[in-house]
Amino acid sequence: MLESNLLSLVIFLPLAGALAVGLAPKNDELVRWIALLSSLLVFAASLPLWFLFDTATHEMQFVERVPWIPAFNIEYAVGVDGISILMVLLTTLITPLCVLCSWRTVGSRVKAFMMALLAMETAMIGVFAALDFILFYVFWEAMLIPMFLIIGVWGGPRRVYAALKFFLYTLLGSLPLLVAILALYFMGGKTFDIQALSAGSYGATAQFWIFWAFFLAFAIKVPMFPFHTWLPDAHVEAPTAGSVILASVLLKMGAYGFLRFSLPMVPDASLAFAPVILGLSLVAIIWGSYMALVQSDLKKLVAYSSVGHMGFVTMGIFVFSAAGIEGAILQMLNHGITTGALFLCVGLIYDRTHSREIADCSGLRAMMPAYVTLLVLFSFSSFGFPGTNTFIGELLILVGAFAQNLWMGAIAIGGVVLSVAYMLWMLQRVIWAEHTRPPGTVFTDLNGRELATLLPLLVLVFWIGLNPAPFLERVQASVQQLVAEISLTGSADVRLLP
Amino acid sequence: MNFAMPDFFPALPEAFVLGMVCLILLVDVFLDESRRDVIYYLSQATLAGALLLTVMTGSGETHITFSGSFVSDLLSEVLKCFVYLVTIGVLLYARPWLKDRDIHKGEFYVLVLFGVLGMMIMISAHSLLTLYLGLELLSLSLYALAAFDRDSGRASEAALKYFVLGAIASCILLYGMSLLYGVTGTLSLVGIGAYLGGLEAQAYGLTLVFALAFVVVGLAFKLGAVPFHSWLPDVYHGAPTATVLFVGSAPKIAAFAIVVRLLVEGLGGLHADWQVMLVMLAVLSLAIGNVVAIAQTNIKRMLAYSTISHVGFLLLGVLAGTADGLAAAMFYAVTYAITAVGGFGMIIFLSRRGFEAENIDDFKGLNERSPWFAFVMLVLVFSMAGVPPTVGFYAKLLVFSAVVDVGMAWLAVVAVVFAIIGAFYYLRIIKLMYFDPPEDTTPLPAAVDLRVALSANGLLVLGLGIFPGTLIALCARALA
């Protein structure tokens, strides 16, 4: 019984937590504890998904189906497979850390903040678990509301601009997605069931339009070059928890969308337009890394590095090989862990210096040894140092890329080199450079709560880096199935112009 | 001549409302100023009684009476029930507003109830004559309501504009109807439908096309579709908020009803012709409504343009012409009325004696003044913008689905583009409520019943957004 409702429990427990926070008396400390406990409870509830996950099958697991809007054949249908399981767990892991990192930094309207955060968690898990297109869309859009408020209410000086840009940009992508979903509904025999729609085959013209509608929605979310301009704004203005959620989870949804919808539903168009996506991915890798190199603002640096890293992910997806896609999924997880941790690190230093300018944060070596150590480790993980998680992910993606085209792999390697450069240069300035602060300024090193925020992520960095097998084996069956399905198609002749 | 007594049973709710209005008129004369609330409770009782009567006498079967000019079917029953419900909300919100402005008079309730009666007749119309009678009863009540605050110059101006333009629209509609009668020789909608059904395709003459054009123009006027919308912003802006509350909500449901009765049941044979007209009206309404709303600083005027854009969405469902499309439009009309009444209710909530919360800036910092009602407004606004999990999302989903179904996906894309533009001005309200500090920190004095009603209204919009299945199925059944 419990197992059959496990996924729904994980999805709606955060919402119950949000309600509990809402009904709690007006005591900020109490509210924080309720939020932390409910998010930890969600994480605990999600652990059985990891342990009970059957690695031998590509079928959906923990499936629940309840009719929801019978007139349109819409179901409440949820389930996870190898593509989504890691994302669900990443979400449940990141949320308690976000509560922790906002413990002191969010001082006003704590109650509303925690409610938004927990409501957000429900929507995010829902996106990854939905097996019905409308359910997916509802979660996908509903997510915008709490995120809009998190950026706009608790954000930095230009929060209003950033929040509006984030909302409108995402809406611009998702409404064409809605039209594409409806078109699929009528072509696919009046069903919104994602698996049924994935099994159908559609004509060339239909695939053309649906592919580009999907592309717009997911490319904005990833974000792919040239749709990435909302990202630095949103990241810089959002509070630390908002940045972490954006980087760790929200950006994954675009890549997840490509894997879950574009590839299985419009495979011919995906194959036909892969060169375009691969080209944009390469541009993103180089451009993002290059932009990161010239930033003087720590948060912007990490934000642009995200653009580059996500370029690797989309490249891995669109080489259509098992290695590439497995690498992409692992890299989605890795990026969530590493970039999330880096944003946490930036937030920690901002709490002390009240500036994100690298110049103002320099020379921390003596004052904050524990912080510096962690920053170095996460930065090394970010550029794929062997032994860390990102190394495995990027390696798999590069294997896929080189197998397809030597030049593509070579350019991507160039991106890796750039990422080494901007990370090391950043470290050099933050850790060793001479600082210009008035003498006597003291920054305290990390306290227990702050360590507790970062250490779980550090463990994962090395766990995946040294023993990726448990993660990869959960992904494998679904990826092989996906690759097999794509290689079987090729019936519809999709051209660059309809 | 066979003069059989018509069957009054299907029109029982109408008879009840009429009787009660007469009673209320009488009671009002003998009532002391200080006991005006009696009229309020009587009016609410009338609506509740009509609701009960409609639910109890309604069987979901089609009954036609009064020599074929009045129909009671599932569609009419469902629509009437929503008219009562929305009007109950209107009266709830309007009373404190009227009291604060010392215009809490019995006439307000009488006029609203006559308006309701007019809508009921429109909804049950089965011939051109009944339809016109109902429409005029509603319109005349609304003209008077717009001028209800007689000392306000702006309200009088709005009422005059409303009356002159509305009368012209009625004339145009009537002219179209007379042409229809001339061509088909019958006033009965079924008769007209049968006549058109008997014609070979494209065999009808120019007169019929003229009649159709006049009818569509008349309807577009009443709906407020661009380019026949010019009265709407001025009326919303100028008329008393309590009146706008009514004008902007329940009549949309009745307007949907006459569009279905006239265009689908009567002129269904000319679908190809009126589809083109409605496409133009819908696209223009979406464009003008959403774009011009961005420039507004007065919230009532902004909601007027928002209404215009919603009419555009509603027309998308109608022009598809399929049963699913009409059900989508019905769902849209009903849920929009529920959302709009809440939106205007929020304006009343923020107003107080001597202060009209008319500017968008009056919503500034509402989250700090009252987090709960800021949340209610957030739900209402996101419902208007069509963001899940509010009911407005399903309304848009259904109309989009209807046009995609008939192969007009391009129209859905156009609508989507304007929906994105529209999202901007809805987001601005959210921004003011949540991101800005309040300018006005006066406590919000609203009474308990207003608070409860507004909360229920917001929760209804959210609840229908999470469980829309029943209402969608009901709309589909009513138009099957």
Image (cartoon, coloured by chain):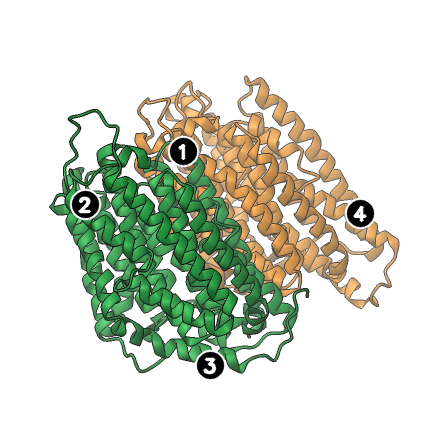
Q: Please state which amino acid type lies under the numbered disc 4.
A: Ser
Name the residue tied to disc 1: A158
Q: Residues within 10 Å of mark 1 (few under 14, many from 20)?
A: some
Both labels 4 and 3 in a single chain = no
Secondary structure of the residue carrying numbered label 1: loop
In the rendered image of this protein, does residue B444 appear above or below residue A305?
above
What is the x, y in percent for residue B302?
Answer: 54, 33
Mark 3 and mark 1 lie on one chain; the one further toward the N terminus is 1
Specify the colour of chain A: green
Q: Nearer the viewer, mark 2 or mark 4?
A: 2
The residue depicted at 84 percent of the width and 63 percent of the height is B202
The residue depicted at 51 percent of the width and 70 percent of the height is A405
Q: Nearer the viewer, mark 2 or mark 1?
A: 2
- Chain letter of disc 3? A
Extreme residue in the left direction: A448
In the rendered image of this protein, does residue B399 appear above or below residue A231?
below
Q: Please state which amino acid type lies under the numbered disc 1.
A: Arg
The residue depicted at 31 percent of the width and 82 percent of the height is A56
Name the residue tied to disc 3: A484
> Mark 4 and mark 1: span between their CA atoms?
61 Å
Quadrant location of residue B317? bottom right
Secondary structure of the residue carrying numbered label 2: helix
> Mark 3 and mark 1: span between their CA atoms?
47 Å
Both labels 4 and 1 in a single chain = no
- Chain letter of disc 1? A
